[in-house]
Image (cartoon, grey):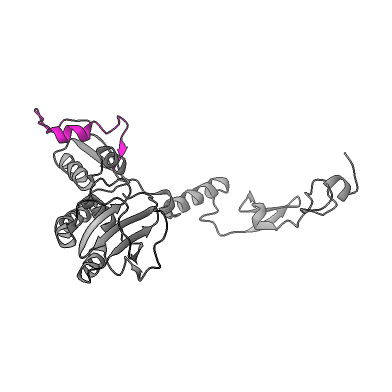
């Protein structure tokens, strides 16, 4: 959920760099805190550029997208698993916040991170959520926070991640509400397969085969047999598709409709004619 954020200047070269796929952010923070490091911990990934400032085992500042508190910033950055971390020593927070011990922040954040991963196994962030067409019972009771979430859903449905953004920066709380409303039958979700995940499968191949069989009846069950009638090749009593007969040679460069290569004269002069 973290968005791009920039910082001014680079205080020094990084003394610690690693992959978040190998070392989770809580482990990196714990290591830095145990050494009493003073500096800036940067977390970078696609669309993510977050920063946490540390001093003597405490967190002293943050810049992480739209996070409003230190806990929210650490939570957002702890969800990044496919990025990188870098520690730059000697830096002080440009906008210091109330100091908090790394251990105290992690004690609050890590259960939220675990709950988040459990919730997204139930609800796809790219799925659509919409109001259920039928009430779950003769009477429906809705809490104020549930009502707030329901008002963020459009009449045609909304992506789950858009609903979370509309609810604010407490993403784990909002996603928990989505699951509650699903459980009580007030909303429904529809998983959407990302376009880039689509691969031609049996259905599309069957459609192609059906179209071919319609154009050339009997081709799917009669052994192919080609003969010539009036100079035209025929297979099983039907015209043979050109691709099965021959590969047409490329057009001659003297044909007036042939486009010229880049950087050459116009077609009219190249082919010896003028329009």
Residue 23 position, x and y percent, is 28, 68
Q: Residue at x 38, y 58 (%)?
A: 45
Q: Main secondary structure of the magenta part?
A: loop
Q: Does 47 appear above or below 141?
A: below
State which quadrant residue 147 falls in. Answer: top left
x, y (%) of residue 195? 42, 49
Q: Which quarter of the figure is the C terminus placed in?
A: top right
Give the residue displayed 22% in from the left and 58% down from the top.
Answer: 59
Which range of residues does the magenta coloring cover? 135-160
Judge from the rendering whether residue 179 lies leftward or rightward of residue 259; answer left or right. Answer: left
Instruction: Name the spot of residue 58 as percent of width and height, x first.
Output: 20, 61
Magenta segment: does it hold 222?
no
175 over 37 or under it: above or below: above
Q: Nearer the viewer, residue 89 or 154?
A: 89
Query: Residue at the location (30% across, 35% down)?
Result: 157
* Nearer to me, 81 or 34: 34
Establish if 198 lies above or below 165.
below
């Amino acid at each position: 959920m973290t968005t791009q954020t920039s910082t001014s200047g680079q205080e020094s070269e990084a003394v610690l760099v690693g992959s978040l796929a190998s070392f989770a952010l809580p482990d990196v923070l714990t290591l830095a805190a145990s050494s009493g490091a003073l500096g800036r911990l940067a977390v970078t990934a696609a669309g993510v550029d977050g920063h946490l400032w540390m001093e003597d085992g405490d967190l002293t500042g943050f810049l992480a997208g739209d996070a409003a508190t230190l806990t929210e910033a650490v939570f957002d950055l702890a969800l990044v698993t496919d990025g990188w971390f870098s520690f730059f020593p000697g830096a002080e927070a440009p906008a210091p916040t109330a100091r908090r011990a790394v251990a105290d922040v992690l004690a609050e954040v890590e259960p939220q991170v675990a709950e988040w991963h459990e919730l997204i196994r139930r609800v796809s962030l790219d799925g659509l959520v919409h109001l259920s067409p039928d009430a779950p019972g003769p009477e429906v009771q809705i809490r104020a926070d549930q009502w707030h979430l329901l008002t963020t859903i459009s009449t045609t449905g909304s992506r789950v991640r858009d609903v979370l953004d509309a609810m604010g920066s407490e993403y784990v709380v909002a996603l928990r509400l989505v699951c509650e409303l699903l459980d009580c039958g007030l909303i429904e979700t529809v998983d959407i397969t990302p376009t880039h995940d689509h691969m031609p499968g049996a259905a599309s191949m069957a459609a192609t085969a059906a179209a071919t069989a319609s154009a050339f009846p009997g081709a799917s069950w009669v052994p192919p047999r080609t003969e010539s009638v009036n100079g035209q090749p025929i297979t099983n009593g039907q015209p043979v598709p050109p691709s099965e007969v021959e590969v047409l040679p490329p057009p001659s460069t003297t044909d007036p409709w042939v486009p010229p290569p880049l950087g050459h004269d116009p077609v009219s002069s190249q082919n010896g004619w003028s329009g």
